[in-house]
Image (cartoon, rainbow, N blue to C red):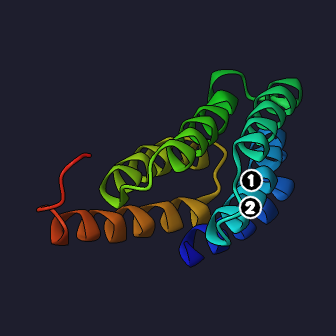
Amino acid sequence: MYWQIGDTLFGSVANIALGAYAALVISIICLVRNILSYQNQLTRKITVVLLILSIGIGLYVNNLAIIGLLPIIASASYTICIYITKNEHQMRWALMINMILWFIHNLYVQAYPSAIANILLCGWTLTQIYKNRHITFK
C-alpha cells in the first residue's frame, strides 16, 4: 500500500506539470481512497462518494479524450475491487489492470517517471502473485 500511496503522490505532481487534469483529479481521489483503505476506514458510503467524485469530476475535466478516460476507468475498477473483496490475490490482479491502464496514460502524456513507477509496481505485484499462486479466488 505504501507503494500505491507514493506512486499516487508523485503522479499528482507529474499530472499538474503535464496538464493531465483528469489524471490529476483521479490521483488526488485515489490518494484519499488508498489512505482510507490502509486505515480500514473505507466504508460503502465513502466508496460510493469517491466513485461518483472520480467519475464525475474526471469526466468534466478530461482534456485528453480516450487517453484521459484510462485513469478514470483504472480508478473506478480498483476502487470497486478494494471495497468488494479482501482477497489479496484478486486485489493484486486488479492492481495489475490498474497499473497497465495508468502506464498507457503515462506514456501518452510523457510522464516517464510515473510510467517507470508503474512498471516497478507491476513487477512487484507479479512477483507477489507468483509467490502466492496457491491462493485461489474465493
In front: 96, or 107?
96
Residue type, label 2: Leu
Q: Is residue 90 above or below residue 56?
A: below
Determine whether, in the image, residue 99 is placed left or right of residue 66.
left
Choose mark 2 or mark 1, whichever is in front.
2
Circle number at residue 31: 2
Q: Quadrant of residue 49?
A: top right
Q: Which mark is residue 27?
A: 1
Give the farthest residue toward the bottom.
Answer: 2
The residue shown at (62%, 36%) is 76
Number of residues whose C-alpha sits closer than 10 Å to that of mark 1, classed few (under 14), some (14–19) or many (20 or more): many
Residue in front for this viewpoint, 61 or 34 = 34
Viewer-nearest residue: 34 or 15: 34
| 117 up-or-down from 103: above or below | below
Q: Quadrant of the N terminus?
A: bottom right
Q: Are marks 2 and 1 in contact (CB under 8 Å)?
A: yes
Residue appearing at x 14%, y 61% in the figure: 133
Q: CA distance from mark 2 to mark 1?
A: 6 Å
